[in-house]
Image (cartoon, rainbow, N blue to C red):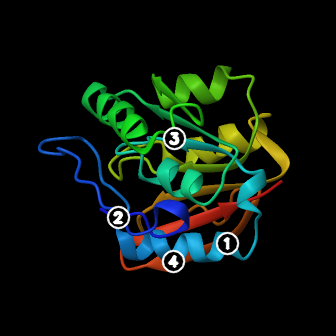
Amino acid sequence: MRITGGKFKGLRFNPPADKWPTRPTTDFSKEAMYNILTNRIDFEKVRFLDLFGGTGNHCYECISRGALSATYVDKFGPAVSFVKSMASKFEIEDQLRILKMDVFKYIKTSSDTYNLIFAGPPYPLKNIPDIAKIIMEGDLLEKDGTLIVEHNPREKLENMHGFVEMRKYGQTIFSFFQH
């Protein structure tokens, strides 16, 4: 895996993902998504939330591009440990808050707010639409913020409240939401 932009651009990292319940976003689709975001948002004003954070890939991208802060949420212990080690390696511990907990519990109970939220849930998860519904009905996403949900073609999110657009890269789909 590699970081595609910003001060860490080109750096590679290899998570020990053997038998991990994660599905990292491919470099191709990730780079396409960040190219879209670069033309729409000022990363230096971003407070980022990464749900189902896995390898921490999106946190590193946002911080590399100048984000004010990033919050990582995942319940898989080995992934959380890996992200802690990467935060130390990249010397970004002061910008990256790492939470080992269930994503649904976090999005239902957190009083924090973010202006960019990315959710990359496991594709077999049965309630992927609930992620967008809970976030769009709550106060987690700021008024002018953006929520991006990564999913496969089986999920149909375009009729949900706040849906703005969808971008498709092979079997990877990014659905964008705003208030």
The mark nearer the N terminus, 4 or 2, is 2
User: Looking at the rendered structure, which numbered label has been put on residue 115?
Assistant: none
User: Alpha-carbon distance for marks 4 and 2?
Assistant: 14 Å
Report if residue 78 is visible in the image: yes
- Amino acid type indicated by mark 1: Thr
Q: Residues under labels 3 and 4: Cα distance?
A: 19 Å
Please give the residue where the numbered disc 4 appears in the rendered image.
32
Residue visible at 49% across and 59% down?
Answer: 150
Q: Residue 69 falls in which quadrant of the image?
A: top right
Kindly identify the amino acid type of the residue bearing the numbered disc 3. Leu
Mark 1 and mark 4 lie on one chain; the one further toward the N terminus is 4
Give me the disc on residue 38: 1
Question: What residue do we see at 38% from left, 44% from top?
Answer: 125
- Percent coordinates x, y for residue 101 in the rendering: 45, 22
Residue 33 shown left or right of residue 76 in the figure: right
Q: Which mark is residue 51?
A: 3
